[in-house]
Image (spheres, rainbow, N blue to C red):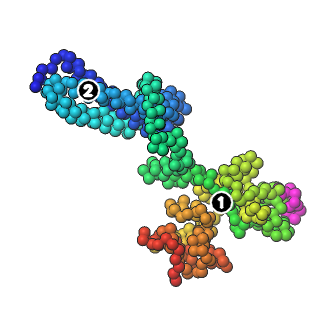
Amino acid sequence: MNLTISQSDWYSIGVVALLILVSAFFSGSETGMTAASRATLTELERQGSKRAGIVLKLTEMPERLIGALLLGNSLANISASALATVLMVKFFGSEGAVIASAVMTVLIVIFAEVMPKTYAIANPDKFAIATAHLVRIIVAIFGPIVMLIEYIVKKSLRLFGVDVDNVESILSAHEELRGAIDLHHREGDIVKKDRDMLGGLLDLQDLQISDVMIHRTKMIAVDASEPMSEIVSMVLKSGKTRLPVWRDNQDNIIGILHAKSLFQSVQQHNGDASKVKLAEIITDPWFVPETRALPDQLNAFLRRRTQFAIVVDEYGELQGLITLEDIIEEIVGDIVDEFDAVSNGVRKQKDGSYMVDGTVPLRDLNRALDWQLPDDEATTLAGLVIHEAQMIPETGQVFNFHGFRFEVLKKRRQQITVLRVSKTAPATVTDPTTAPQ
């Protein structure tokens, strides 16, 4: 064993230390570049950060970026290990190889892998931006070699039936955004109100007019045959700015009455409503199909510079109405003004259950109470119970499904008007069942 260290040996030790630092740089850069937020980098680039733009361009070719960094990291680690082995063999003879392997494994794992990657994963954007210029140079230098490696890798994978050129993401961009929003909400970075708003915006593309419209049974409409004094009184009581007008039967919508136009006309006749001609102040109704997607209807509202439409089905039969406010509420939640009803149809009881009107939309219920009731086959709570039960329930019947207990409390003819809803124990069977009161 010879422990005499010459000047050249000190140089070799310094080179080993330098190579470990180089390896740490490559390890940290790989983690930082792959973990950096593209959204953050895009915003920084918009604000004028050239380094952020470089990182975005590098991450657009992930195979080449990772290949170059791994190549550099491997060269640094192998060179450091080889040089350390030479030194250890010189100092300790044949046992030096084993000692070098043990020492270099500890040094590389701690200082060249775990430490830089831990820092990079904690500060990915900062690390990626700081190393952007140097990484770009490295990728350019190792580019030809990495391209050859990529070619060999792809050909090898195809031998096993894997075509990396045609790999598609399991989730769509909207689903990935939804997952990111839910993740940040669970981690406490996004409050429920903001999560619901962002989620509502993403869900808009999956909704049709029929999912959010005011159903015909809830429409407040004006009978054209009524005296104008009665019509004025009705408009005042409704609290609405626009009302559909029908003649002969409620399905025959002949126009839209704007409260502003009505009161202006009454004022022009010195308050004598009987002199107002309804046909002169109503506007033509705009009919839209119930199957139109909400984003398309929103754009249509903006193009026509209006915010009120009558909804019909494929046969032209009246189904309800939709307003611009209905679509906006899907994003921001209920917009309550001084004319809206205070109650939203959901009343919490002392025992923890909820008294819910059958007409309450499932989307509103899920948003308000953070539930996960499915809304694919039904729009309202009553519709969900009927769909799951495959029958029109009687008052007093109880159903258990989707982790909840539904008790029918009130009915009006064949319509479920009030239900009691409460969560059930996890062991509850999810298939619909009935039980006596």
Q: What stretch is highlighted in magenta?
A: 267-283
Left or right: residue 377 versus residue 183 is right
> In the picture shown, does residue 70 fall above or below 372?
above
Q: Position of residue 426 (x, y in %)?
A: 43, 69
Q: Which residue appears at 52% of the width and 43% of the height?
A: 167
> In the picture shown, does residue 388 fall above or below 264?
below
Q: Nearer the viewer, residue 8 or 17?
A: 8
What amino acid type is highlighted by mark number 1?
Val
Q: Residue furthest bottom?
A: 436
Q: Which residue appears at 24% of the width and 32% of the height?
A: 104
Looking at the rendered structure, which numbered label has been put on residue 276? none
| Residue topped by disc 1 | 212
Marks 2 and 1 sit apart, C-alpha to C-alpha, by 69 Å
Looking at the rendered structure, which numbered label has been put on residue 82? 2
Crowd rating for badge 2 (residues with CA inside 10 Å; few <14, some 14–19, many 20+)? some
Q: Position of residue 181 (x, y in %)?
A: 50, 49
Q: Which residue appears at 51% of the width and 81% of the height?
A: 435
> In the picture shown, does residue 92 fall above or below 407?
above
Mark 1, secondary structure of its residue:
helix
Q: Which residue lies furthest to the front in this view?
A: 159
Q: Do the residues labelled 2 and 1 touch (CB within 8 Å)?
A: no
Please tell me in which quadrant of the rendered image residue 222 appears.
Answer: bottom right
The quadrant the N terminus occupies is top left
Q: Which residue appears at 24% of the width and 35% of the height?
A: 106
Q: Nearer the viewer, residue 232 or 431?
A: 431
The stretch drawn in magenta includes residue 269: yes
What amino acid type is highlighted by mark number 2?
Ala
Left or right: residue 45 versus residue 129 is right
Mark 2, secondary structure of its residue:
helix
Residue 332 shows in the view? no
Of the numbered discs 2 and 1, the one sitting upstream in the chain is: 2
Left or right: residue 332 versus residue 101 is right
